[in-house]
Image: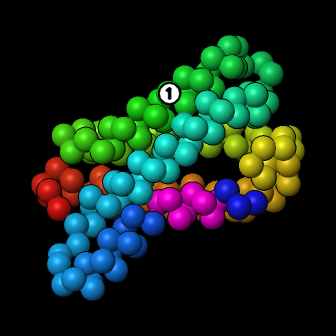
Amino acid sequence: MITPIIILCLLAGPLAIAYFYCKSTGTILNKRKFAYWGLSSTFLLFAIGHLVKADGMVAMLPPWVPYRLALVYLSGLLELFIAITLLQPKYQSVAAKMAIAVFVLFFPVNIYAAFNHIGLGGHQWGPSYLLIRAPLQLILIAWTYFLCVKGSANKTE
């Protein structure tokens, strides 16, 4: 059950390191920049998971879903695209909005996997795993919205 901790460390790590660096050097923290870096590294982890652990991800999908392996690979490529695009200042806002859409659209798969005790990433714990997963999803969405999307049209911070 270490995956949520890894996700949170990847998400907040760049911002935390930059914060302490700026405090020690007396420089101004560009929190938006490092929030994007954290979100990008998190999406890179998600992409690697979908591309490397594809068979486990396929099992998380209901059997009636067609082309399950192709969908897992496509979702991994989408996550990789988002990870890369989050590092491109011109497209960061759009990529962050795509990230929120992915968090919302992929969550039903996590619910299905938890209710069916599918053993990947803690889902074998069953519905109780959602007590960790749902708040994590909310943290990811809040991070993305408040630190990356909100105000991005009029701020270059």
* Residue 139 point in image, percent of width and height: 51, 62
Is residue 116 something that shows in the picture?
A: yes
Is residue 98 something that shows in the picture?
A: no
Residues in magenta, as a range = 4-12
* Residue 49 point in image, percent of width and height: 63, 39
Q: How is the image coloured?
A: rainbow
Quarter in which the C terminus is drawn? bottom left
Q: Residues within 10 Å of mark 1 (few under 14, many from 20)?
A: some
Q: Residue furthest top?
A: 67
Is 103 on the left-hand or right-hand side of 100? Answer: right
Res. 73 image quadrant: top right
**Label 1 amino acid?**
Leu
| Residue drawn at point x = 79 percent, y = 48 percent | 123
Residue at numbered disc 1: 77
Quarter in which the N terminus is drawn? bottom right
The secondary structure that dominates the magenta segment is helix
Q: Nearer the viewer, residue 7 or 147?
A: 7
Task: Judge whether residue 28 is colored magenta.
Answer: no
* Residue 121 point in image, percent of width and height: 74, 49
Considering only vertical position in the picture, is 16 above or below 11? below
Is 56 on the left-hand or right-hand side of 35? Answer: right
| Residue drawn at point x = 84 percent, y = 44 percent | 119
Res. 74 image quadrant: top right
Considering only vertical position in the picture, is 59 above or below 152? above
| Residue drawn at point x = 76 percent, y = 39 percent | 112
Q: Nearer the viewer, residue 6 or 156?
A: 6
Is 140 on the left-hand or right-hand side of 66? Answer: left
| Residue drawn at point x = 63 percent, y = 26 percent | 72
Task: Judge whether residue 11 is colored magenta.
Answer: yes
Q: Secondary structure at mark 1?
A: helix
Q: How many marks?
A: 1
